[in-house]
Image (tube, helix red, strand yellow):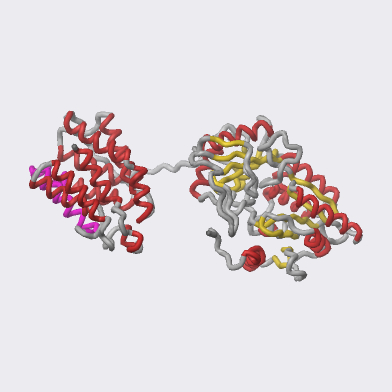
Amino acid sequence: MSRFFFNDRQQMVNDAIEGVIISSRFHNLARLDTDPAIRVVVRKDWNKSKVAIISGGGSGHEPAHAGFVGKGMLTAAVCGDLFASPSVDAVLNAIVAVTGDRGCLLIVKNYTGDRLNFGLAAEKAKKHGLRVEMVIVGDDISLPDNKQPRGIAGTVLVHKIAGFAAEQGKSLSDVRDIAQSACDSIASIGVAMQTCNLPDQNEEEGRIKGGHVELGLGIHGEPGASTVASQNSQQTVATLVKHLRKKTGTDTRLAVLVNNLGGVSSLEMAILTKELAHSELKEQIDYLIGPAPLVTALDMKGFSLSTIVLNDQFIKALQADVETAGWQTMVKLHAMPMQKHSIIRKGMQVKSSENATVKALVASITKTLIEQEKALNALDAKVGDGDTGSTFAQGARDIAQLNDDGKLPLNDPAVLLELIGERLATVMGGSSGVLMSIFFTAAGQKVAKKQKIADALLFGLEQMKRYGGADLGDRTLIDALQPALEALKDSDLNAAVKAAQDGAEATAQMQKANAGRSSYVNSDNLKGVKDPGAVAIAAVFAGLK
């Protein structure tokens, strides 16, 4: 089954080109009006007074290549089918359309199809009397013994540097030499935990196993150089940096392009950028470009790092403004600033005390919730956003740490309940943290007034229901909590544990949720699925035994 939004497989590239052109904020792009099989995006403000810069290749790498057409970068981009080199005729038509007396430079990624098609087109263009030069980018260092290294994300840096040189009015030979110098100064390496999917094709089963990443994956999904048994962000970045330092040396000044291969969330890209800024490469990095998708591989769950050894000429070129949709402004790498601020929340001043029985209960409950984190997240993913386990575990870890450090008032139940309420409001996210905070805080206030624990907890429940808006039967954690507390008051702990379990089980048969996040979910998705909050409450009571 396809994982793509598209109308017609044969029209995907044409439709994408139209989308790129009509959404350009500079309104400076056009498609050559020629044979429909020839897909060339050009600058419509181009007057042939300077050296033209042309690049291209297979589609599926967006924003490369059409996203880099514009003043200061490419003059034209030749778009092939998905992961397929454009034809000789397409490249030739691009050359003829944009090349004037100053000539043109072709920037080609080092793949056989691209080299052959662009190369033959260049020779044919020369027969038309046009001046054409070509540089080949081979920045991939994942296979160090490869005599023909692939051209990957570092190609964009060549586009930028050559485009700047051309914009300055330099000669074709000078632009070519500058571009070649850039090629010689760039090193790239990528990693992915999932390969890309092609329209109308099934994902390759078992290619990259869970908990692993593949180093050196090609931008067309080609197998990588090796597999690393980790998805830890720090370790992954450290692995890439190790390879890059071997290539660039340890005393060079660098700019680093952080490239999203298409399927990594912005959150993860920010984390990876942070890891880069704290890696062994940090003392060498002067500038960052990205994190952003620049040369993608459709929806590949991976990223790449490209370094360029800097000189004054490259810095000036990379800093220059351009009129393109895809380029990311280069920024100076700097440490995260911290702004002083006096916290407005005042924590409770409590005196710790010991009670072995209570300490053991707290330890058992928190341990249970922490152990249930993944299971609760998986359950919540069916009816919510998959974070119930993490939310409860976060609160449990905080209380467990205080318990281990001997900082809880274990022999003062009123203060203990209120302190737990305060801490949960601070460390637990979402509505669950607030609700549980209300529950414990209200219960603690009643215990302070000499009310029995069971009655105080029921009062906390009523306050939770009052502010949260949910009630028994609404398919929330209350469906486990209320019967458990009522059983605790009228009977004993064993009855409370069973009541909580029965309440959680009952939520699986409730066809409609009237409150909480499940209320936003289609009832068909709720069938047979227990409410994760109710399951968490059942786990808490089980931990009391």
- Where, quadrant-wise, is the C terminus in this rendering? top left
Q: Where is residue 179 in the image (x, y as percent from the top left)?
A: 77, 46
Residue 291 visible to the viewer: no
Q: Where is residue 163 in the image (x, y as percent from the top left)?
A: 75, 53
Residue 144: name its quadrant: top right
Residue toward you, 406 or 264: 264
Q: Where is residue 56 in the image (x, y as percent from the top left)?
A: 73, 56
Residue 150: name its quadrant: top right
The residue that appears at 75% across and 40% down in the rendered structure is 148
Residue 50 belongs to the span the image colors magenta:
no
**What's drawn in magenta, residue-wise?**
443-470
Main secondary-structure element of the magenta-colored stretch = helix
Point out the residue furthest to the bottom here.
33
The residue that appears at 50% across and 43% down in the rendered structure is 271
Q: Where is residue 74 in the image (x, y as percent from the top left)?
A: 73, 57
The residue that appears at 62% across and 40% down in the rendered structure is 224
Residue toward you, 408 or 262: 262
